Image: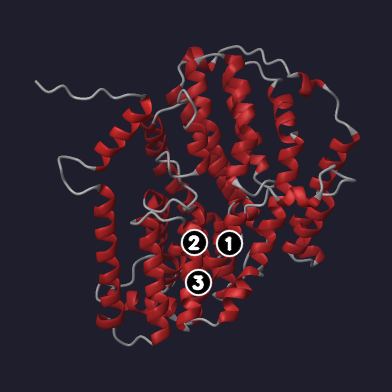
């Protein structure tokens, strides 16, 4: 009788499970299937673009091919977003679809400088611990779980105007979550809090122009397509009410469906930690004053006429100085998400190619021609289609900025050919792409809060919340795009 070998360790068991997951019933491994499907799609795209499609100039074909290949690399091959974006930008320059100067110019784009300066500001705030201390001081005043959840939601929402990265906000609020969860000590409340924090972090990002790189990409597309791009305050006036409503909606759904009456009405005793009890020092007050001044200067950029990147850069230099925060500027620079900045630069080149070569306009004309036999659809249907596609795009494309880069030229601009304002469609596409909480891998904040040991919530909890939130999210965004935004001056 042959005795099977015993698995020596937990590591061996994990390796065996991974191998079984990769190969099921003796069929081809998943990685090989992905490689085969991706290669077939690239070949099909090449045939369609270079042989089947007629009437396209060579720069248009090259732009489309690079666009399609980067999309396949992000989705099917699941390759890292930044190297793919940079490779796409380089390919466009090498083939002559865009000039080499376009690649260099992307690195100096005002979007890149704005995000870099905002990241420095966020690094100073994260290192100071002020956000955590202020949050604990505020939350310690409330004595039942229900009220606590609403105040947590509003607190997270406010930080969207100061901290540009959802990942940075998730890292800042993780100690707050852990402190609340350990003090309350109820598993049901811990699960609900773990769902609330990343949900509100992601939904509230829509409120601020610097809340996500996708918003800056959207503004760049609006500007280059001939529209009037909103500034920091303009974006907030359009998007902050929507972000607030969806954040409150998520909070209400979590309270209603993930907590019972006993948990909702549980009385709290949240003593402030020793670090929270000490008074604010002169340095703390200086950081708070400088941050408030930066936000005020960004919000009033239309009045004083200084560009947003310059305002943010000056603010970053002031805040990241030893006289104000005690943090040397070189140390603050280590908090900059250079990977995101390079990714933004690469995607800007790809977007520039689609616009400058006339590819986006050609796609719009052909889409209109294809539907010409059916008739012109009503504006509300066009807007609803753009919102639906953007809302569920996170299932196949994880990066929010990548979704905006793909969906704006491939969906928003072609649909604008049916008589809907390009600016409105670009806005709903960028904001709709912020719904990214269906799967654990859909967004970094979700992965951070869901990846704790032991797990605070399950994938089924996340999916359940996403299914409850998706339709109200789509309906609210359609209401804003079709009714509220036109009333304040954004055409539909």
Residue 249 visible in image: no
Q: Earlier in the sequence, mark 1 or mark 3?
A: 3
Image point (55%, 68%), residue name: 348
Q: Position of residue 391 (x, y in %)?
A: 42, 51
Q: Residues within 10 Å of mark 2 (few under 14, many from 20)?
A: some
Q: Label 1 to label 3, Cα distance in Å?
A: 11 Å
The earlier-in-sequence mark between 1 and 2 is 2
Residue linked to disc 1: 342
Question: Going 46% across and 22% down the picture, which residue do you hit?
Answer: 454
Q: Quadrant of residue 49?
A: bottom left
Please state if 159 lies on the left or on the right of 78 as rendered: right
Query: Which residue sits at x=63%, y=74%?
Result: 105
Q: What number is the disc on residue 89? A: 3
Residue 67 x, y percent position in the rendering? 41, 70
Is 124 placed left or right of 107 in the picture? right
How far apart, in angstroms, are the residues tagged by discs 2 and 3? 10 Å
**Would residue 278 be found to the left or right of residue 44 on screen?**
right
Kindly identify which residue carries mark 2.
83
Q: Is residue 332 visible?
A: yes
How far apart are the alpha carbons under marks 1 and 2?
Answer: 9 Å
């Amino acid at each position: 009788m042959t005795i099977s070998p015993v698995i020596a360790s937990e590591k061996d068991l994990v390796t065996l499970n991974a191998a079984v997951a990769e190969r099921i019933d003796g069929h081809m491994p998943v990685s090989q299937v992905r490689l085969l499907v991706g290669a077939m799609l690239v070949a099909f795209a090449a045939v369609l673009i270079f042989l089947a499609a007629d009437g396209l100039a060579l720069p248009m074909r090259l732009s489309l091919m690079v666009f399609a290949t980067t999309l396949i690399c992000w989705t099917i091959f699941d390759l890292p977003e930044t190297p793919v974006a940079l490779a796409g930008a380089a390919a466009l320059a090498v083939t002559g679809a865009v000039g080499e100067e376009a690649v260099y110019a992307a690195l100096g784009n005002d979007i890149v400088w704005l995000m870099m300066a905002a990241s420095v500001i966020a690094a100073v705030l994260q290192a100071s611990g002020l956000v955590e201390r202020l949050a604990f001081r505020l939350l310690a005043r409330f004595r039942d779980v229900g009220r606590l959840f609403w105040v947590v939601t509003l607190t997270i929402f406010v930080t969207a105007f100061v901290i540009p990265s959802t990942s940075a906000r998730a890292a800042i609020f993780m100690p707050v979550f852990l402190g609340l969860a350990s003090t309350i000590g109820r598993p049901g409340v811990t699960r609900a809090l773990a769902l609330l924090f990343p949900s509100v972090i992601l939904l509230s990002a829509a409120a601020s122009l610097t809340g996500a790189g996708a918003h800056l990409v959207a503004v760049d597309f609006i500007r280059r397509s001939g529209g009037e791009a909103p500034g920091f305050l303009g974006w907030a006036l359009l998007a902050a009410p929507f972000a607030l409503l969806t954040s409150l909606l998520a909070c209400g759904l979590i309270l209603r469906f993930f907590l019972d009456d006993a948990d909702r009405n549980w009385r709290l005793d949240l003593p402030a930690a020793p670090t929270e009890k000490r008074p604010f020092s002169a340095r703390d007050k200086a950081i708070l004053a400088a941050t408030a001044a930066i936000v005020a200067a960004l919000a009033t950029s239309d009045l004083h006429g200084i560009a947003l990147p310059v305002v943010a850069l000056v603010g970053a230099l002031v805040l990241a100085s030893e006289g104000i925060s005690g943090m040397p500027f070189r140390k603050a620079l280590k908090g900059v998400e250079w990977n995101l900045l390079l990714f933004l630069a690469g995607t800007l080149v790809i977007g520039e190619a689609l616009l400058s070569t006339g590819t986006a306009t050609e796609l719009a004309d052909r889409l209109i021609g294809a539907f010409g036999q059916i008739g012109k659809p009503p504006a509300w249907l066009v807007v609803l289609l753009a919102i639906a596609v953007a809302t569920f795009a996170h299932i196949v494309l994880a990066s929010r900025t990548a979704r905006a880069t793909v969906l704006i030229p491939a969906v928003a601009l072609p649909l604008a050919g049916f008589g809907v304002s390009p600016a409105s469609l670009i806005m709903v596409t960028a904001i709709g792409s912020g719904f990214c909480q269906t799967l654990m891998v859909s967004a970094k904040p979700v992965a951070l809060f869901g990846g704790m040991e032991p797990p605070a919530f399950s994938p089924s909890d996340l999916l359940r919340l996403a299914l409850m939130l998706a339709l109200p999210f789509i309906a609210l965004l359609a209401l804003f795009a079709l009714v509220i935004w036109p009333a304040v001056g954004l055409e539909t």
